[in-house]
Image (cartoon, helix red, strand yellow):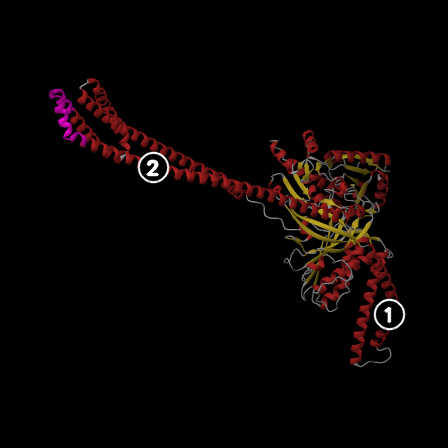
Amino acid sequence: MPTPRAAPKLWRSLMVASLVPLLLAGLTLWFASEYRRAAQTNDAVDQSFRRQLAIESVFSAVQDAETGQRGYVITGDPDFLEPYRNAGLALPKDIAALEKLLSGDPVGSAQLPKLRRLIDLKFAELERVLAARDAFGRDAAASIIVQGRGKQIMDDFRAHVATMVRDQNAMLARNLAFEDRRNAIIRAAAWVVVILSTILAMLGAVIVHTARAARYRAQQQVAEATARQTAIFRHSLDAIILVNPSGSMEMLNSAAERMFGYPSQELLRRDLSLVIDIAPGTGPFLDRLGVKGDTIEVPLRTPLEARTADGVVVPVEVALGTMPLEDGIHIVAAFRDISGRARVEKMKDQFLSTISHELRTPLTSIVGSLGLLRGGATQELPSDAQRLVVIAENNANRLIRLVNDLLDVEKMQTGLMTFDFEQADMRDIARRSLDSIRGMATTRAICLGLTGDDRPLAIHGDTDRLMQVIVNLLSNAISYSPEGGAVTLSLAMQFGYVHVAVTDQGPGIDPDLRARLFTRFAQSAHRTGPTPGTGLGLAISREIVHNHGGRIWWEPALDTSADTGSTFTFTVPLWNGLSGQIDDLGARRLLLFCDAHEAATIGAAFSRREIEADVVADHEAALTALANRHYVALVMDFQFAGEDALTTLQQIRADPLHRSLPVIAIAGETPPLPPEKTAALDIIDWIFKPVSPFRLNHAVGAAVERAAVAMPLVLHIDDDIDTLEITERALVGLARIAKASDLSSARSFLAMHDVDLLIVDIALPDGSGLDILADLNRTGSERIIPVIVYSAQDVGSARVAPNVEAVLLKSKRSLPTLVETVMNITQRSSAEKL
């Protein structure tokens, strides 16, 4: 798929778009300037015309005055003086007008004084001739005219007028030429504008067409690429799922629907672990998956087990890729059914099984014979021969261990491995395992340690097989630890399971090995022990643990640096000896302080109530049980407890968390203690022996109802129905659970009920779960409702909210942590209320 171009910059587009209006504005200003100049030129031309007319008008008036003067001299008729008199009256006005017109003309203004002087001389001469005519007659006037002075003045006047007219014509010609040149420039500019506009219009049309064509081609390419990708996605034989950064499924193809047996709508927004667990552990989904930047450390993972809607397990291999989008890194997971490959593996396993069986007999004979030779059964061997026999015997024993491991794996996978289940104490199994491996540790100076719970850890399992798991983990830890190091075996009881952990100080697990750590023949290159392993021990251990209802995993050691040390942990369910069932963490429980026979009788009386029971036989055991579990009631046989009865109840009531614990007392014919001593102990019922099942059931029912009222009310908000149901089951007997799948119903519930705790998911259909936090903060109530954010997304900012007590990321191991957190918060709240 081609790399998309960078998005166009707005400022660049605006700059290009502004060039055209800027050019047009410049042209407009230029045309306006030229128009003003043209107007000025027109004014100058008009002035030239009017100056010429004014000059000619002055000349014509002088000429008229001369003509009238001569007519009068010749004829003596006064009428001939009319033009003379009119000229004398008009000339001052004409000269003033001419002076005004010539005010802006330096040349004409310079010529004007001479014009006035010549006019004055001419009129003076005309007046002298007229005076002679009137005084002496026509001859006297004619003699003056004949002298030629008037003619000379008139010639000078005419020549000066002609000069002035010529100068004005020259100025007019210059203005007209300048106007012609300017008009030519304007016409040329107009044509340039027209041509440029045409070019720009055509260029714009070409650009628009090119852009539209490019967009059309790009859209076609995108459509074709989308069609190809959609066709590949839809018609691929491999199941393909698009997973968002929080681990929820966003899109899947038809092959995925067929493989997993779900319609696509049922899987959208559901966690990927519903169909397959490709990212075990805790923490953000992308971190658990091994995403570094936009790459995945282990892109191909095989074999894994996918679960269909019918519960069928399908062996698959998964190819993982990243898809960076705006909201984060999405994962494209392609699943391939490897059932055919599994059948081939099965055939291979059967072949190995047959070969292994066939090898076991001759190997046994070889080992036996070598043992006899080494022990000198026939004769004492030389030292060199003795050494060769020891080497042969060790390698034969190694072959036998390999054969046994192969047979164990084959039997477990085919379901033919039998287990001898019985009630046992995991502490005893751990001690025996340490004793069996101590010799190997001594040879490498490894210090073995046992830490953890000193209480009985009752389980139901195969002792030998569980020892095999622990010994295998210890053997690996010793083999990979440096000489003189330490290996620790620790035990703990958490949420109905025994946790057995082995921690070493070795080099850790190679990143490329982690994904296939519990597969067959998986081995690290950092083994430091004297004998290389078979690579089957962890695979066998995993099968043994799974057959016991537990699980096994690896994680870096917490007390070492990031790249060294390993901790292998497996779990086995606790066993309830009274009910004969695996300990159910979510079941309502009674604590029975009585002997075993009476406990069995009491257990039978309330077996239909789905209530589990723990039995204790002394004061310390009772207090220890109450410190680790929530009970709906305590049933105490005062005769059995003896002197411990009163002490036990007083210590229980002294603890704020157990002050309201219902107590059912069993006694003989009368209460063993006076009323003044038992009144403060809040015993809800006395049942006298022989115990009546009806009376006991009634008392237990009252205790259950009382415990239910006292239990905290928890509102769980999550749009995943499975998560709501699983959480409710895990908290049965520990809290009252209300469920909401969206913000609207959650707000309605909060408006009508006072809850003690909120469990909130982030991604909800009608908004973010964090909006509930804002609602709680806006109420202004002094009561602060604690909140647990329980989501598949990394919330970050929710941690700063004052009422958020914990932020938990959904994962395979997060449910026990959620239950523990709920209990810690509610118990602390109860203690604060008290």
Q: Main secondary structure of the magenta part?
A: helix
Residue 818: x %, y % from top left: 70, 44
**Residue at 78%, 80% in the rendered image:** 384
Judge from the rendering whether residue 280 lies leftward or rightward of residue 607; answer left or right: left
Q: Residue 645, percent across and down?
A: 76, 41
Q: Tell me the number on the disc at residue 173.
A: 2
Left or right: 50 as drawn, with respect to 789: left
Quadrant location, the C terminus: top right
Residue 48 seen by the camera: yes
Q: Quadrant of residue 98?
A: top left
Q: Nearer the viewer, residue 690 or 508?
A: 508
For image coordinates 65% across by 59% down, the residue present is 563
Q: Nearer the viewer, residue 204 or 96?
A: 96
Q: Nearer the viewer, mark 2 or mark 1?
A: 2
Say which residue appears at 60% left-offset and 39% top-offset: 802
- Neighbours of disc 1 within 10 Å: few (<14), some (14-19), many (20+): some
Q: Is residue 580 above or below residue 689?
A: below
Mark 2 touching mark 1, by CB under 8 A?
no
Q: Quadrant of residue 215?
A: top right
Q: Is residue 55 above or below residue 793?
A: above
Left or right of 818? Residue 105 is left
Residue span colored magenta: 127-151
Q: CA distance from mark 2 to mark 1?
A: 136 Å
Q: Which disc is residue 364 wearing?
A: 1
Can residue 140 be found in the magenta stretch? yes
Q: 129 or 51: nearer the eye? A: 129
Residue 648 among magenta residues = no
Q: Is residue 483 above or below residue 712?
A: below
Q: Circle 2: is it few (<14), some (14-19), or many (20+) Cα within 10 Å?
A: some
Say what amino acid the circle numbered 1 marks: Thr
How many marks do you count on the picture?
2
Q: Position of residue 831 (x, y in %)?
A: 66, 38
